[in-house]
Amino acid sequence: MSNPEERYIVTVDDKEFDLTLSKQESIFVVNSNGVEYRVEAEKLTDRKFLFKINETTSEVDINRNGDHLDLFLEGKDVNVTVEPYNLADLKKRAGLALGIVKEKIIRAPMPGLILSLAVRPGDTVRKGETLLIIEAMKMENIIRASADGRVKEIFVGPGRAVDKNEKLLEFE
């Protein structure tokens, strides 16, 4: 049995792909630029999956951070963002995809402990760049820049416990 196709804009590092996805039995069918990929997924642990794409099998560690997925695949870190096509299109039409920091204040997405900071005040960051790492529920969560910008102020430091929605840093 086949499910209806869903369309997504997937950004891998800085490359954007327009994909359609449908499910046939236990296999996902992904179409990108007329090329069809048949994908099978097996969950090994909470963060580790085994993917078979056509005839190639890969083990992937996945850490979800909001709408970002941080993947560790074949010894490399890969930053992925997945958005429904309609939402991505609406953002572009509304001018929200111009590469300008939308939120001036970055807040903690969950309570946790600040493990490390990757930036300092005055640093210029690019979209997808790591800002800091929070440990929550024994998992490391990477907080990344949602767009290009300059760090104005940092409100936390390593070893500090933070509450959900607490200010972490501010952009100019």
Image (cartoon, grey):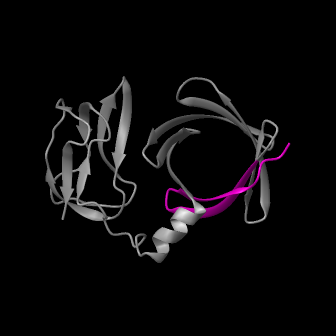
Characterize the magenta stretch by its predominant secondary structure: strand
Q: Is residue 2 magenta?
A: yes
Q: Which residues are magenta?
A: 1-22
Q: Please tell me which residue is depicted at 25% across the width and 47% down the height of the picture.
A: 107
Q: Please tell me which residue is depicted at 62% across the width and 31% down the height of the picture.
A: 49
Q: Please tell me which residue is depicted at 57% across the width and 29% down the height of the picture.
A: 48
On-image quarter of the C terminus: bottom left
Q: Is residue 37 magenta?
A: no
Left or right of residue 70: residue 171? left
Quadrant in the picture for residue 35: bottom right
Quadrant in the picture for residue 135: top left
Could you say which is closer to the camera, residue 115 or residue 27?
A: 27
Q: Please tell me which residue is depicted at 31% across the width and 38% down the height of the picture.
A: 133
Image x and y of residue 3, in percent: 78, 48
Left or right of residue 2: residue 60? left
Image x and y of residue 4, in percent: 76, 53
On-image quarter of the N terminus: top right
Quadrant in the picture for residue 43: top right
Image x and y of residue 56, in percent: 76, 40
Left or right of residue 166: residue 80? right
Could you say which is closer to the camera, residue 87 or residue 11?
A: 87
> In this figure, what is the number of numbered marks?
0
Q: On screen, 26 above or below 37?
A: above
Outermost residue toward the right?
Answer: 1
Left or right of residue 101: residue 85? right
Image x and y of residue 154, in percent: 15, 49
